[in-house]
Amino acid sequence: MINADLFPSLVALSWPEGQVRIAFDGDGVLFSDQAERIFKTQGLEGFFQFEREHGHTALPKGPMQAFALKLQKVRQSLGETHKWRVRTFLVTARNDVGNVRVFHTLKEWGLEIDETHFLGGLDKTPFLQTINPAIFFDDSRDNIDRAKVYVPSAQVVYGINNVDVNPVATSSSIENKNVQNEHST
């Protein structure tokens, strides 16, 4: 349930019938886990410093970058009058320090995301409830566990957040390896 006192504008939002909404996390999903690795090894201040120094350098591609670009092609094929039927969202824990690099990356890739939400570490669940996506992709098991109660969610088994995950036990990890192989060629 969304707390209307905290998110009054979100509660009133409604979406067009027949629209498919796809929500992506940033680091470890659309982007590589480079920033997450910096955060885990150097802490929040180390992450902020790294992002300030690399703000105009595109982030490396993550496992879902190619999929997001394909969704964009689908939208383009629908034409201007129907592209509203597929809507994309970036819902990330990053804050204003990391957003410069994200926007630079999206521009360099030519990837248009309809809405970007930089939550600064807030719980993504209330935002996802409002977005009501057909699916939400995140690399964090904790984020998936909170979100899956309200919206269809899929864990992207990739990077430092998933070092303890058994890749044999998860079919999505096999797909992830295929995506990684595509990026290495």
Image (tube, rainbow, N blue to C red):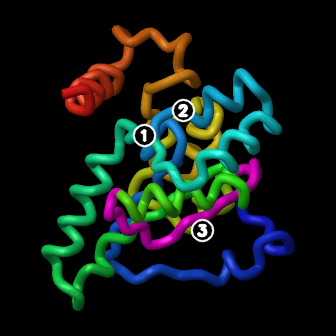
Magenta highlight range:
109-123
Mark 2 or mark 1: name the one nearer the start of the chain.
2
Q: Position of residue 71 (x, y in %)?
A: 26, 60
Q: CA distance from mark 3 to mark 2?
A: 29 Å
Considering the whole magenta stretch, tell me its main secondary structure.
Answer: loop
Looking at the rendered image, the disc whose residue lies closer to the viewer, 3 or 2, is 2
Q: Amino acid at mark 3?
A: Thr
- Identified at 52% across, 48% down, the residue is 26
Q: Position of residue 140 (x, y in %)?
A: 58, 33
User: Marks 3 and 1: in contact by CB < 8 Å?
Assistant: no
Give the numbered dot on residue 130: 3
Mark 3 or mark 2: name the one nearer the start of the chain.
2
Q: CA distance from mark 2 to mark 1?
A: 8 Å
Give the numbered dot on residue 156: none
Q: Amino acid at mark 2?
A: Gln
Q: Position of residue 5 (x, y in %)?
A: 86, 74
Looking at the rendered image, the disc whose residue lies closer to the viewer, 1 or 3, is 1
Please, is residue 127 above or below residue 54 in the view?
below
Q: Which residue is mark 2?
A: 34
Q: Is residue 153 visible?
A: no
- Identified at 42% across, 67% down, the residue is 113
User: Marks 1 and 2: in contact by CB < 8 Å?
Assistant: yes
Residue neighbourhood size for the residue with mark 1, other residues' Cα within 10 Å, grouped as few (<14), some (14–19), many (≥20): some
Q: CA distance from mark 1 to mark 3?
A: 29 Å
Along the horizontal axis of the image, is 54 left or right of 78?
A: right
**Badge 3 element:** helix
**Badge 1 element:** loop
* Total numbered circles: 3
